[in-house]
Amino acid sequence: MLTDCSAVHGLNRRDVLAKLGFGAGAGSIQQFWGQLMAATSDSPGRPGEPVIRPAATAKAKSVILIFNCGAPSHTDLWDMKPLAPDSVRGSFNPVETNVPGIQISELLPQLATRMDRLAIVRTVHHSHGGHNSGMHWSIVGKPYRLDSTLINPSRADIPCFGTLVGWLAQQAGYTASVPPYVITPFPHCDSFQYLTPGQFGGCLGARFDPFVLNSDPNAKGFQVPGLQRDAAISIDRLHERSDLLLNLEERGTRIHSPLAREITVQREKAFSLIESKVASQAFDLNQEPEETRNRYGRHSWGQSHLLARRLVEAGTRFVTTVNGPSITWDTHKDNFNQLKNRLVPPMEQAFAALLDDLAERRLLDETLVIWMGDFGRTPMINKDAGRDHWPQCYSVVLAGGGIRPGQVIGESDFTGASPKNRPVTPADIHATVFAALGYHADQINYHMNDGRPVLVSDGTPIHELL
């Protein structure tokens, strides 16, 4: 059975619902996230610990993570090696950007004209070459207990930085009507059979799970499943059903277990979303002009990026847009044609549109955008004109949120195989994100199932970016 490191102390389900306003008339859904936090925990962290709030001077308020499952080739996109041997260099040429002295791939002409909004970190590295363990290290900032693709989440997991950003927001009294952490369109995974550990609530518990769309926002007639109340059921009738359910449960045998608590929390989340008009509107892409939707691209990635913009505008703190499905960037074969014809065009269109849209709406300064993958790909081209897994050195790109743009951090060696100077870990990327959000991550703990305190991040913020 899954175990939860955060217990509900001294409250039964009726107590929780009463605090939330369910079962005794309509509650204030706008207060849901903060009230749920208060109703299901003695304190934001451990009893007696102070509420953790971001620094008032923080520029970033939210994060959009563009995650490329399967791992894009860094030497074909962000860290070109035009002087390397043919067996390394590949098919593409570098082009100048609008920042003198910085070159990126000819595959990225739109982003080349927006380099003054971007910062490239070219020396990120870790040591896990399996997709799920590599994704775990990238989004959690720590290694998984084994290097493998054939792994799945549990309630003993260390939570990723998206989970922790949502956790910190709820500690500070998050009151927006949209979930604090959303993943679109599908979760990090390998072949949909093995979901990446860490992306859910992990040891923090079910109330910190992300809202996972599990639906293609580009699909005809797209609607988020279960987000809207059936028109045949009035709001009063919905509350009557909730009362009836409470009465039935009160008459039955009360079960005290982590799984029972998870069911309670997920049910409250569902009620909150069904009653929230703000949430349904934020997820409704039909409210966007066709011109805007086309600008992002009429594909899953483009519409996910547009949805991310709508969500941060509505108050969501962390949105992950998974450029999948599954490990679609896993180019062991025909790397160059796949990048040119299938993978890069929709990714770049959506990325460029997101940057422009955020800037035009004056949201870019307060929204930190991150582009990353599991790891990089081998400098050496294999016999199938592909590149294999390479966690020893790869690139991560950041924009907005107070990040200093128009620069490159770190330099890889002659072939892009290893950092030549300024090596950076995923934990350092995370520490930078938390710093941009106004947190000293090395001074904040959460607790594992056995009570051990764990730092939100043990990395060092990249000072050149802040």
Image (tube, grey):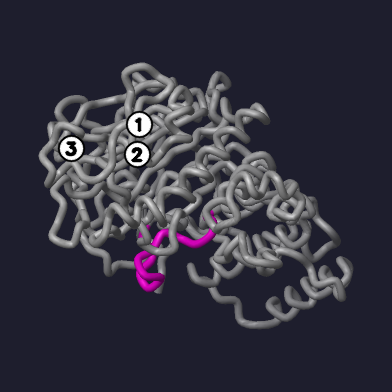
Labels 3, 2: front one: 3
Q: Secondary structure at mark 2?
A: strand
Residue 91 appears in which quarter of the rendering? top left
Circle 1 SS class = helix
Instruction: Indicate the quadrant containing the N terminus: top left, top right, bottom left or bottom right.
Output: bottom left
Report the front residue among 319 and 379. 379
Q: Earlier in the sequence, mark 3 or mark 2?
A: 3
Q: Which residue is mark 1?
A: 442
Whole-percent x and y of residue 175? 69, 43
Q: Which residue is mark 2?
A: 455
Q: Amino acid at mark 1?
A: Asp
Q: Are marks 1 and 2 in contact (CB under 8 Å)?
A: yes
Which mark is first along the chain, 2 or 1?
1
Q: Is residue 221 visible?
A: yes
Q: Which mark is residue 416?
A: 3
Q: Residues within 10 Å of mark 2 (few under 14, many from 20)?
A: few
SS for callout 3:
loop
In the rendered structure, find residue 133 and report the number of the disc placed on it.
none
Q: Point out the stretch of residues depicted in magenta.
A: 183-197
Q: Are marks 3 and 2 in contact (CB under 8 Å)?
A: no
Left or right, residue 326 beside residue 320: left
Q: Amino acid at mark 3?
A: Gly
Residue 327 on image: x %, y %: 35, 61
Residue at screen point 48% across, 28% down: 114
